[in-house]
Amino acid sequence: MNQICVIGLGYIGLPTAAVFSNHKIRVVGVDTNPNVVSTINSGRIHIVEPQLAEVVKKVIKSGFLRATDKVEPSDTFIIAVPTPIDSFSRPNLKYVMKAVKDISSVLSPGNLIILESTCPPGTSKTVLKFLESLRPDLIMPNKLSKKNDIHFAYCPERVMPGNVLYEIIHNDRVIGGATPKCSELAKQFYEIISTGECIISSSPEIAELSKLAENSFRDVNIAFANELSMLCDKLSVNVWELIKLANRHPRVNILRPGPGVGGHCIAVDPWFLINGNEEITRVIKSARIQNKAKTKYVLDTIEREVDRSRSSRMGGKLKIAILGITFKPDIDDFRESPALEIALKLTQKLKNEIFIYDPLLDHCPNQLLKDYFLTDDVYNISTFDLQILLVGHSHFRENINKSGRLLDFVGLEE
């Protein structure tokens, strides 16, 4: 293999490019953001991910990885671009289709295209039809055809931020090729780096659905935990003690509740199943609604506590610290973060009473919050009337400021 081209150098694409290039395979990474390209080419990274910086520095220095803003001819193409939802919770595939269009101009017979981005069912068929329209001179994979010029497989990423480098290598992979040969080629490709099992599904559609089913399952289970936490709050019962006791049952594993659900996977992927199938995805949709409701419940709880604190002081301003705005502990990713949503709404209502501190962020991720953002040294010497813990960063376990009342929504002290 002469070269791999990875389109999208974010939380999935960059680690994937780094792992393959660490196996002494030449990889060109493509991103539309010039700052991302220049950062990577300087041997640095633009995201927080354990051990990734060391690997990127090594493979950039060795010459096996480089970044650019244009797709180049390669043997294998990996598409790892975002697939967001719009304001109506409908899947938006514009980044995928843009990547496909860019790839089409440099395709040659024998190339393998792998789509890793999470997609709604049927996306692989849509991509192949689009490729056929763009490159009628090439035979796209078809189970009815004995000879294909291009090979295609859908292979969803299944890694967890904060442990990506380990899971890229060790997790099992689901591979859905457009033909049996496509599946086998994709399997051989991933076996270069993977110690997990590469499992071939019967079709790309099954592979597409497997990723959506996994994250929808997790969303439903988190919704149960979040619902339980609201019930316990109403009953004045300690939810953390309840969960510990219930989980002593050998077949029960209740997850930990929080201020909602964030990230680009669990908070988004269920909508890919719900969209167009609302009548038969009632449990999945209810879970999405309940997890969003938990965010509002937390916000309402905070506002009530603020009112109580203000009353006990006979009015006047409070000094309130919001602790954590990323979507999960110990990463710098704030996509779909319920903590960030809560922070934005609180600053709108309480304005100069609010301060925000997140030890994982060296800059404020949202312009609307920049005037409220605290650095480490300012947070450590400050005194607060109320601290609101929304993300359970490891840093907070040992370094939380002891001043003022603490509202803990993540069970950090349990």
Image (cartoon, rainbow, N blue to C red):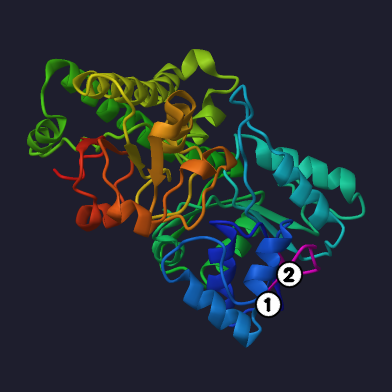
Mark 1 or 2 closer to N-term? 1
Q: Is residue 301 visible?
A: yes
Amino acid type assigned to the residue bearing label 2 in the image: Asp
Place of residue 152 in the rendered image (x, y in percent of width and height, measured from the top left): 69, 54
- Determine the image quadrant of residue 404: top left
Q: Which disc number belongs to residue 75? A: 2
Position of residue 37 in the picture relative to residue 154 (left or right):
right
Q: Looking at the figure, which quarter contains the C terminus? A: top left
Q: Which residue is mark 1?
A: 1
* Magenta-highlighted residues: 66-77
Q: Which disc number belongs to residue 358? A: none
Q: Looking at the figure, which quarter contains the N terminus? A: bottom right
| Residue 87 on the magenta segment | no
Instruction: Assess whether mark 2 and mark 1 are in contact (beta carbons under 8 angstroms).
Output: yes
Outermost residue toward the top? 279
Residue at 51%, 35% in the rendered image: 269
Say how many tags the image has: 2
Secondary structure at badge 2 equals loop
Above or below 317: residue 406? below
| Residue 74 on the magenta segment | yes
Residue at 71%, 59% in the rendered image: 31
Position of residue 373 in the picture relative to residue 309 (left or right):
right
Q: Nearer the viewer, residue 12 or 392?
A: 392
Above or below 20: residue 184? above
Residue at 29%, 54% in the rendered image: 381
Above or below 270: residue 370? below
Place of residue 285 in the rendered image (x, y in percent of width and height, measured from the top left): 45, 20
Badge 2, how many Cα within 10 Å: few under 14, some, many 20+? some
Q: Nearer the viewer, residue 337 or 168?
A: 337
Place of residue 298 in the rendered image (x, y in percent of width and height, measured from the top left): 32, 26
- Determine the image quadrant of residue 16: bottom right
Secondary structure at badge 1 equals loop
